[in-house]
């Protein structure tokens, strides 16, 4: 029996539109075809479960077979199968029921926005993104059913005939087009299967028929499935071991470091949501290493890092989230306007915050050991989400220059100021001065802290954060004692100005608590922050890129400084410059020319000993 028919669609341009605009990534066709096979198996399994079909030997299976010589890819399932009537209904008619609307909506767009298969029932036709001709061989589970062959070359016509298929199920045979030849490669197909089908619920086996003349066994199926049918996120958290969590992390993510800890999401109400979020170890002290959160729907991969579902700051984590309530093909506009999606996003954020609070309260030492790795993530989350900040503010830690971890209420404050170090190596001299005088400060040396300090000042408006080399003369100032010989401060300032000849350098004379330090340099905090922002973003905010005001504070309690007035003019110049160099070294790294000049002057200073 042979039957010919015409696809019911008014436009002759449907297939070119499908090929061009169906998806932004054409490799997704494999997900669509394999997922259809899973659906057919699930339906058959359901019939077995309710007793409509008696098949105690049923073993769900999907085979993906690449024939390099024939340039075909076959996806075969042992699911429900279809009758001729069902092929007409589900392949020819239903798939095109919304085709006219589809054409009208998308034909004039260069990049249709995701989700159109999900809305128009065109999943099967994604195969034409890589194929010139597609064939279907199918045999229904129904008693006395006749096997059916369907084929179409992408034109408006199709052909249906009987065929000799004897095993129940459906096989889709795709004949690669020129555009699809990249998939006539076993490595490419294997990686695509891993990307989209790694956790599909039924075993998938991959095999490859070698081209003629090539060595190797032909059409030999692999002994192991290429997927994991029962991923760890489906288990109850109480039934999972540490080893299982770590093994699953290695399976999914190419990271040589094990995660610090994880959160197992297991929600049944008010929506269905499962997943595991890992806190990775940060390998870069200054930069936040991007994470990766894979989104699934019923174990079928959708995409990575969809910010409408996963809040942006959580994308610094690694993990998987499976939300069956989401359709496979979802547009950005759908996600942005769907109230349930917003609830899912808020719930994930709350679960992460709850886990962190629990670790802080019950495992404080472990929490402190994680802090350097998780602090950029938490701070970024606070900046992006005020509600997250409110949940986290009492468990955010601040490491002090004395090596202690303190909460916000415990951190050292002087008047209404919190002093901090942004580089413990460069600012070592200032840290030493603080320690020598019984003062404390916190360490904020990650790149994100530039933004976080500004955010904290906005939230805690009574406090001002000041870097340890900025505006600190008031905390280091000491009153002169009666037994100290008075010093002419105006004369000292004049000597330094004439010796240094640096026009925009402000010079002050002041008695400091640390007598051993001849001078320190402070920088205007506000101007320095603007400079820091400009270095990161360029002058995109129209802020001045003028160098921040520097102030040289001469320590009149220092013996060398006090004796400068008695030196000859040339020796004064040499010593003043050397004192300035020492203060500069304590404040930042010298440039090559500055270092060269410092070395030359150091040799000259040693010559004064003669």
Image (cartoon, rainbow, N blue to C red):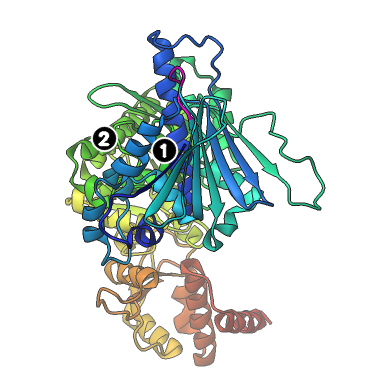
Q: Is residue 142 magenta?
A: yes
Q: Looking at the image, is mark 2 or mark 1 earlier in the sequence?
A: 2
Position of residue 241 relative to residue 408, above or below, is: above
How far is the residue under mark 2 from the one under mark 1? 33 Å
Q: Magenta segment range?
A: 139-144
Residue for point 50% across, 19% down: 240
Residue for point 23% across, 54% down: 100
Q: Nearer the viewer, residue 366 or 201?
A: 201
Dot 2 corresponds to which residue?
344
Residue for point 29% across, 47% down: 96
Q: Nearer the viewer, residue 148 or 552?
A: 148
**Among all residues in the image, which is located at the extreme front?**
1
Horizontally, residue 399 falls left or right of residue 218, namely left
Dot 2: element: helix
Horizontally, residue 493 falls left or right of residue 254, namely left
How far across and down, in percent of the image, does residue 581 sit? 51, 76
How far across and down, in percent of the image, does residue 262 sit? 45, 31
Q: Nearer the viewer, residue 570 or 89?
A: 89
Dot 1 corresponds to which residue?
405
Numbered disc total = 2
How far across and down, in percent of the image, does residue 493 sit? 36, 82
Q: Is residue 276 magenta?
A: no
Disc number lying in front (2 or 1): 2
């Amino acid at each position: 029996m042979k039957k010919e028919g015409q696809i019911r669609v008014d436009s002759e341009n449907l297939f070119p539109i499908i090929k061009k605009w169906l998806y932004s990534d054409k490799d997704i066709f494999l997900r669509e075809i394999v997922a259809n096979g899973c659906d057919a198996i699930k339906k058959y399994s359901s019939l077995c479960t309710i007793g409509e079909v008696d098949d105690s030997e049923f073993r769900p299976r999907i085979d993906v077979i690449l024939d390099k010589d024939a340039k075909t890819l076959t996806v075969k399932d042992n699911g429900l199968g279809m009758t001729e009537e069902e092929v007409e209904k589900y392949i020819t008619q239903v798939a095109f029921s919304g085709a006219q609307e589809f054409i009208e909506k998308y034909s004039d767009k260069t990049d249709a926005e995701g989700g159109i298969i999900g809305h128009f029932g065109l999943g099967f036709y994604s195969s034409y993104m890589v194929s010139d001709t597609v064939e279907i061989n199918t045999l229904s589970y129904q008693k006395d059913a006749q096997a059916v062959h369907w084929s179409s070359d992408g034109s408006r016509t199709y052909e249906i005939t009987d065929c000799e298929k004897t095993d129940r199920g459906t096989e889709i045979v795709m004949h690669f087009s020129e555009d699809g030849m990249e998939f006539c490669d076993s490595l490419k197909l294997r990686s695509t299967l891993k990307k989209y089908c790694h956790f599909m619920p039924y075993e998938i086996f991959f095999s490859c028929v070698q081209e003629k003349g090539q060595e190797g066994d032909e059409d030999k199926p692999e002994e192991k499935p290429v997927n994991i049918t029962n991923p760890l996120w489906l288990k109850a958290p109480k039934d999972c071991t540490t080893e299982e969590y770590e093994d699953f992390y290695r399976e999914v993510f190419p990271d040589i470091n094990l995660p610090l800890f994880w959160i197992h999401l297991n929600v049944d109400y008010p929506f269905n949501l499962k997943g595991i979020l890992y806190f990775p170890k940060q390998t870069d002290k200054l930069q936040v290493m991007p994470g990766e959160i894979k989104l699934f729907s019923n174990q079928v991969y959708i995409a990575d890092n969809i910010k409408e579902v996963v809040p942006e700051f959580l994308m610094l984590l690694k993990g998987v989230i499976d939300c069956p309530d989401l359709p496979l093909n979802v547009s950005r506009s759908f996600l942005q306007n769907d109230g349930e999606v917003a609830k899912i996003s808020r719930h994930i954020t709350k679960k992460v915050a709850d886990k962190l609070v629990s670790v802080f309260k019950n495992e404080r030492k472990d929490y402190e050991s994680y802090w350097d790795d998780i602090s950029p993530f938490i701070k970024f989350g606070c900046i992006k989400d005020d509600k997250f900040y409110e949940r986290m503010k009492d468990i955010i830690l601040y490491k002090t220059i004395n090596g202690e971890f303190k909460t916000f209420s415990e951190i050292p404050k002087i008047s209404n100021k919190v002093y901090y170090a942004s580089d413990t190596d460069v600012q070592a001299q200032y840290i030493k001065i603080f320690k020598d005088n019984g003062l404390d400060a916190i360490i904020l040396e990650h790149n994100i802290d530039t933004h976080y300090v500004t955010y904290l000042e906005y939230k805690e408006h009574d406090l001002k954060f000041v870097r340890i080399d900025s505006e600190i003369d008031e905390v280091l100032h000491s009153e002169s004692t009666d037994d100290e010989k008075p010093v002419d401060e105006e004369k000292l300032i004049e000597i330094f100005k004439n010796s240094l000849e640096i026009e925009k350098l402000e010079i002050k004379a002041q008695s400091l608590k640390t007598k051993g330090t001849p001078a320190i340099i402070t920088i205007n905090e506000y101007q320095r922050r603007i400079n820091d922002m400009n270095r990161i973003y360029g002058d995109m905010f129209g802020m001045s890129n003028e160098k921040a005001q520097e102030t040289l504070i001469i320590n009149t309690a220092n013996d060398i400084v006090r004796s400068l007035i008695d030196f000859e003019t040339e020796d004064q110049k040499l010593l003043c410059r050397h004192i300035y160099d020492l203060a500069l070294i304590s404040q930042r790294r010298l440039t090559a020319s500055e270092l060269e000049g410092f070395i030359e002057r150091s040799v000259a200073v040693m010559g004064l000993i003669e």
